[in-house]
Image (spheres, coloured by chain):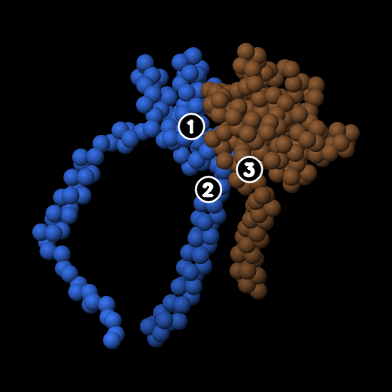
């Protein structure tokens, strides 16, 4: 005997079903706590301005172990150590630039998600602009060529009409 | 005629440029996972930490000046460190240069048990419980091994387990001929 898979009956979702689904999705979106509530880092600095700088810095420093995360979001031990370092430096009155210099001296440019503009990193910053210019030039040439073609194509037609 | 040439010249130029860029990438692929240490060619970061064998005493970088040494970052929580341990024991056996250990964010008792069980390749082990010294050295994953010269300058860094290949290819050639000949 041949076994046959049961035939799938396409089921239509009723309008009420759609509405219920939308309500559930909406409720999840509204009721879940904002992202900060899940943050791995509970550090609170005494001064709100300091806290803002701390948050900014820890979000722009790369976790070297899990390279696509900032140290602010990484649960890895090393990220916690680096956050502690940032906190201690800020509490000691160091500037944001001091903290960045400290990190770059130890881990290299790679630790900054927003690399500095230096001879070594210039191409990272300039490449998009250069590529955009190249693209603009190429499309400008194509448009110009096609426009010329259209003018040529129409010429005989216009002669015909005039005749 | 000129236009026809152009039509192929530009894509060809782009293609050649792409090949060059990718070729550079492929050529460097053995190190693609490792990040160039800014420490290379600079003075080894100073430290002063408790000695694992005798916590009352301090291991300090100042004492290490004047000779070549390998600075090896490890921990008992690190699987790759177990994998490289046999190689470390061979390095000790060769007596080419001393191994200085940095026990990174580890438990002293476990570290001592590990060395008692697997053998101790280190001349001395410094204990970095807070991880502060490891940050100074730019360590981001154990095991890492640094080659330091008598002037206290970091000459070479290897991320991952030390292997006979790395020893022969990267470490021995950097040592002065007389030291290396002993291996």
Q: Give the number of the mark in front: 3 or 2.
A: 3
Residue B56 visible within the image: yes
Chain at tag 3: B
| Residue at the spot of label 3 | B83
Choose between A44 and B71: the one closer to the eye: B71
Residue B140 visible within the image: no
User: Gap in Å between the C-alphas at discs 2 and 1?
Assistant: 35 Å
User: Gap in Å between the C-alphas at discs 3 and 2?
Assistant: 43 Å
User: Which sits earlier in the primary sequence, circle 2 or circle 1?
Assistant: 1
Expressed as whole percent of the image width and height from the top left, the position of residue B63 reads 74, 17
Chain shown brown: that is: B
Secondary structure beneath label 2: helix
| Residue at the spot of label 2 | A128
| Residue at the spot of label 1 | A77
Label 2–label 1 contact, CB within 8 A: no
Q: Give the number of the mark in front: 2 or 1.
A: 1
Q: Residues within 10 Å of mark 3 (few under 14, many from 20)?
A: some
* Identity of the residue drawn at 12% across and 64% down: A14
- The hue of chain A in the figure is blue
């Amino acid at each position: 005997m041949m076994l046959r898979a049961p035939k799938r009956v396409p089921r239509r979702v009723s309008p009420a079903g759609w509405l219920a689904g939308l309500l559930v999705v909406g409720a999840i979106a509204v009721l879940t706590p904002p992202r900060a509530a899940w943050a791995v880092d509970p550090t609170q600095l005494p001064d709100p301005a300091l806290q803002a700088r701390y948050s900014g810095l820890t979000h722009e420093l790369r976790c070297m172990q899990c390279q696509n995360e900032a140290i602010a979001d990484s649960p890895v031990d090393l990220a916690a150590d680096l956050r502690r370092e940032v906190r201690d430096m800020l509490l000691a009155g160091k500037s944001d630039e001091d903290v960045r210099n400290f990190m770059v001296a130890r881990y290299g440019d790679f630790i900054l998600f927003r690399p500095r503009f230096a001879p070594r990193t210039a191409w990272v910053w300039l490449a998009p602009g250069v590529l955009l210019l190249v693209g603009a030039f190429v499309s400008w040439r194509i448009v110009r060529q096609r426009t010329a073609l259209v003018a040529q194509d129409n010429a005989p037609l216009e002669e015909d009409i005039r005749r | 005629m000129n236009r026809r040439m152009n039509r192929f010249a530009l894509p060809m130029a782009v293609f050649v440029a792409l090949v060059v860029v990718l070729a550079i990438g492929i050529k460097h692929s053995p190190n693609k996972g490792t990040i160039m240490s800014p420490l290379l060619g600079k003075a080894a970061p100073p430290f002063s930490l408790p000695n694992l064998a005798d916590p009352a005493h301090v291991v300090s970088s100042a004492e290490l000046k004047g000779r070549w040494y390998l600075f090896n970052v490890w921990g008992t929580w690190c699987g790759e460190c177990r994998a490289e341990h046999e190689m470390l024991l061979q390095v000790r056996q060769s007596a080419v240069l001393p191994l200085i250990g940095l026990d990174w964010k580890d438990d002293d008792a476990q570290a001592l048990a590990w060395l008692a069980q697997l053998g101790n390749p280190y001349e001395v082990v410094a204990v970095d419980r807070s991880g502060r010294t490891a940050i100074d050295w730019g360590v981001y994953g154990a095991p890492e091994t640094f080659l330091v010269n008598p002037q206290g300058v970091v000459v070479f860094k290897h991320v991952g387990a030390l292997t006979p290949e790395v020893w022969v290819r990267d470490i021995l050639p950097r040592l002065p001929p007389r030291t290396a000949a002993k291996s």
